[in-house]
Structures are given as structure tokens and as C-alpha cells.
Amino acid sequence: MSGTPPPGPALFQPLRLRGVTLRNRIVVSPMCQYLAEEGRPGAWHMAHHARFALSGPGASIMEATAVTRDGRITHGCTGLWEDSQVAPWSAITQLYRDHGVVTGIQLNHAGGKGATARPWEGAGPLPEEGPEAAWACIGPSAVPMRPGWRPPRQATEAEIEDVVAAFVAASRRAVRAGFDLVELHGAHGYLLHAFLSPLTNRRDDAYGGDLARRMRLPLMVAEAVRAAIPPEMPLLWRASLTDTVEGGLTLEDSIVLARALKARGVDLVDCSAGGIAAPVSLLAQKVPHGFQVPLAEAVRREADLPTMAVGMITDAVLADRIVAEGRADCVALARELIADPAWAYHAAITLGVADPEAVLPQPYAFYLRRRAQAQGR
């Protein structure tokens, strides 16, 4: 993470992680679409990802993808729990590859946040009966994730071992599907985060108690997946670095975790917060732009590990400054890219990139160069 960068805006410098190089520091953050059929992405997903494949980011990480059928958040979540799900993902990774965009998959087990309705259907617990009925969920302890929710069943040690095996099997399918990197979802109240947080992990066995024991399952998953994927393939970890409430996971805890993850071959921490006692949704919070950047900066500094900053990063100047000042190695955007699929191109213009149209595929670049000439730019 040292050395003199080449000239030009920091946001548009390449980033190398193991054997993979991102052409710039702009990452499409995972965005659940809740429209899969039995875990298989379909026509909507192809259209959704085509927008980003043609828009010039350095990488795109696919939505939270379940490693088991019962590890879904909703009935509409994507999966890699069986071989039939590999081919539809392969079509999407090839689409990105054709346009020079690195692809990642975010592997997840929802734990006690599973068996819920889609967000636009209320995001509450599913009914016991009906065409989209609930299923049984496991967690570190029988602690409901929200008031009024069903508590998950405390996972047995055998089930914990099965979870590790499921992450490994899904990561191998991700390799077969053509993904360039794997991200493990250890954030937002899902199973791996729930094991880490003292708010949801009340166990008194080898998987609960002090921080070292609460980290045991997450570290087992990271180590096993690292061994299962090619050595040149980057491994990322999505982290809720703090639960944001007293008695929950702290930034100091997460720095300890990040150091342990680095020792097990994790290459970058994707830095978020909340999801157990505090909501992830920005609609429920009033937050400044880049409000989570200090978390990414702290992990980068204290764990000597590359980080990705997320959360209300919408302005190109801010995004460039985050990277240029060494506060994070890349930035991830989600809703901003839905609102403006040409965000990377607009950022290149704002930041004075010599040939901003080169951010886009040649057919778009050709027409936009002519547009720029007509406008006197």
C-alpha cells in the first residue's frame, strides 16, 4: 500500500489484489434484487448488470448470495447452493468480462435474518403457511433479530461445521461460474456477523463468550474458503465494524478480527456498520456523506490491510479524496449508480481525466467524444 501512484486522479488508478487488477477504484456494491427463482438469477439480473458492465467501474460485486437454501434472506435471493445455479451466473460474469470489469460474488448465510419478506413487501417475518412460507432459521443463539420476530434455533456444532462446508462448496461454484473474487458477508446481522456480535451470540461453548471464541466460526469460514479458491483469487470480507450501540461489537474488536483475517489470507475488508441493533438502511438515519470512511481508514491503518469505503459516497471529488489521502483503497457505490449509471464517466469529467470517454466501451466512447466536441469541451 505504498509507492508513488501514476499521474492522474487517484480514483482512476488501477488496484491490484493478488492476481486480479481493477482498472480503477470504483466498485459496484452488492445490491440484492430479490427476484431470483430458486436461487437462479434471470432476465432481470442480466439487464441490471448490463447497465453496470457498460458503465466503466473497476469491479462489480454481485448481491448477497446464499450458500444454502435455508440461508436465504427471502424467497427471491440468489444462491450458489447447487450446481444448477452456476450457468446463469456464468452468463453474467462473461458479460462483465467482455467489457473489462472485474466480478465478485458476495457469499452469505442469512442466519436469523432469513425467512423474511422482500423489502417492498414489508421485510417482516414470512407467514407459517402459503406459497412463500417461512423456513426454520439457525443462529448462534435463540435471540430474535428484531422485536416480534421468531428467534432462530441455536445452531449445533454439527450445523456449524455444515455452514463452513456450504461456504466452501459455494466458493468452488463461484470459481466455476467465472467470478474473479469472492467476498464473504460478515456484516449486517447475517450469520457470520451474528456469531461475532455479543448482542446475538450468547453461547458458552467454543463458539461464544469472549471475542476469540466469537471469531471462531468467521475465521473457520475465511480459512476454509481461502484454501478452496485459487491462490491468485482475491478474498474479501464484508464487515459491520461496529454495532453502533453499547454492548455490541466495537471498532477495536473488528481491528482484532481484521488482523486475524489478514493472517488467514483475506485481501481486503469492505467496511460497513450496523445491522443488528441499528438499521443498515440510510432511510432510518441522518448521516453525512462518507460517514463510514473513518472506519475504513482505521482498519487500513491498524490492521495494515486494504479497505473499501462505503456509505453515502456520491460525489466524485469526495471519492477521489478518500483514495488519494490513503483513507481507503477503493470506494463502493450502490443506489448512486442506479440513479446515474454513467457515474464513472461523469466522475472522470469532474476530476479532469484526459480522455474521460475512454472509461466507457468504444461504441459509447465514440459517440460521446463527438458529443463533447459539439459542446466545445
Image: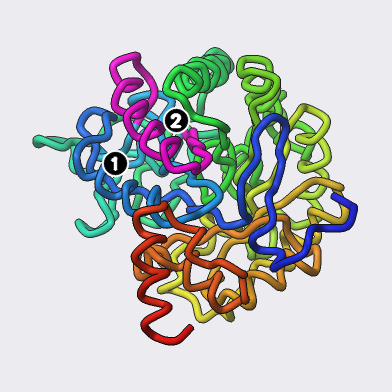
| Residue that badge 1 annotates | 74
Left or right of 255, for residue 288:
left
Q: Which quarter of the picture shows residue 260?
A: top right
Name the front one of labels 2 and 1: 1
Residue 248 appears in the rendering: no
Q: Secondary structure at mark 2?
A: strand
Query: From the viewer's perspective, is residue 57 above or below residue 171?
Result: below
Q: Tags 2 and 1 in contact by the CB under 8 Å rule?
A: no
**Picture coordinates of residue 136, whole percent (x, y):** 33, 29
**Picture coordinates of residue 228, whole percent (x, y):** 62, 15
**Would you call the spot at circle 2 few (<14 residues within 10 Å), some (14-19), or many (20 or more)?**
many
Q: Earlier in the sequence, mark 2 or mark 1?
A: 1
> How many angstroms separate mark 2 from mark 1 (CA)?
15 Å
Left or right of 176, for residue 19:
right
Left or right of 226, for residue 369:
left
Q: How many marks?
A: 2
Q: How is the image coloured?
A: rainbow
| Segment colored magenta | 79-108
Query: From the viewer's perspective, is residue 213 above or below residue 364?
Result: above
Q: Residue at x 77, y 40 (%)?
A: 211
Three-letter amino acid code at disc 1? Thr
**Magenta stretch containing residue 80, yes or no?**
yes
Q: Residue at x 53, y 54 (%)?
A: 276
Residue 40 appears in the rendering: yes
Q: Which mark is residue 138?
A: 2
Q: Which quarter of the picture shows residue 342?
A: bottom left
